Amino acid sequence: IRDGKGAGFITRSRVQGSKITGVVLGIGLNVESRPEVERTAFVPDAACLRDFTNNSECNIKVVSEKLLDSIRFYYEELISYGYGELLNKYTQRSAVIGRSVEIFTDPVQGDPKFVISGIVSRIGENLELYLDNGKNPITNGRLVIIK
């Protein structure tokens, strides 16, 4: 949100052959306060929803209820109509399409290593990023938006 990290997502999936056998999704959302974070290229600043609203109702209870309602709505849309419209909404709201970025590895241990830089030209059907100068889509890693 305005160059501050206000949320984070963790996803993992398990696949056997062509079948998805398990999925884990974690959502972290800064609602009422911004955490103290060490600023890095990956997290230049922190933000919270309350910073961007005059609404005193911006609290964890209200936001959690709205978030769960939205997840339920979009899950039902996904089941009923497939992923096409959701992908369109996602790409229209993207903060990275058309932006210069750097991609780094995301190691479990050790420091991230630079992989490639370029301008994000599009997001693929599997949410992979395509860079204007890259031959292969980016399917994992850590992203830095270059100002």
Image (spheres, rainbow, N blue to C red):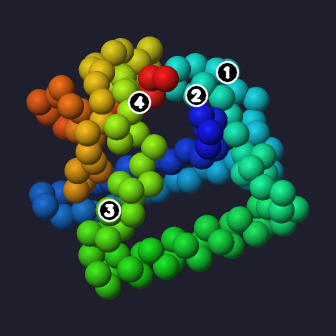
Residue wearing tag 3: 87
Residue 28 seen anywhere in this rendered image of the structure: yes
Q: Earlier in the sequence, mark 4 or mark 1?
A: 1
Is disc 3 in contact with disc 2, using a CB cutoff of under 8 Å?
no
Q: Is residue 104 above or below residue 78?
A: above
Residue wearing tag 1: 38
Residue wearing tag 2: 43
Q: CA distance from mark 3 to mark 2?
A: 25 Å
Residue mark closest to the camera, 3 vs 2: 3
Q: Tell me the amino acid under the disc marked 2.
A: Val
Is disc 4 in contact with disc 1, using a CB cutoff of under 8 Å?
no
Q: Secondary structure at mark 2?
A: loop
Residue shown at the point (27%, 63%) measured from the top left: 21
In the rendered image, residue 140, in percent from the top left (x then y), is placed at: 31, 36
Residue mark closest to the camera, 4 vs 1: 4
Asked which quadrant contains residue 145, the reply is: top left
At label 3, counting other C-alpha atoms closer than 10 Å, the crowd grade (few under 14, some 14-19, many 20 or more) is: some
Q: CA distance from mark 3 to mark 4?
A: 20 Å
Q: Secondary structure at mark 1?
A: loop
Q: Tell me the amino acid under the disc marked 1.
A: Glu
Q: Tell me the amino acid under the disc marked 4.
A: Leu
Asked which quadrant contains residue 79, the reply is: bottom left
In the picture, the quarter occupied by the N terminus is top right
Residue wearing tag 4: 143
Q: Earlier in the sequence, mark 3 or mark 2?
A: 2
Residue shown at the point (18%, 64%) measured from the top left: 19
**Left or right, 11 with reference to 71:** left
Q: Secondary structure at mark 4?
A: strand
Q: Earlier in the sequence, mark 1 or mark 3?
A: 1
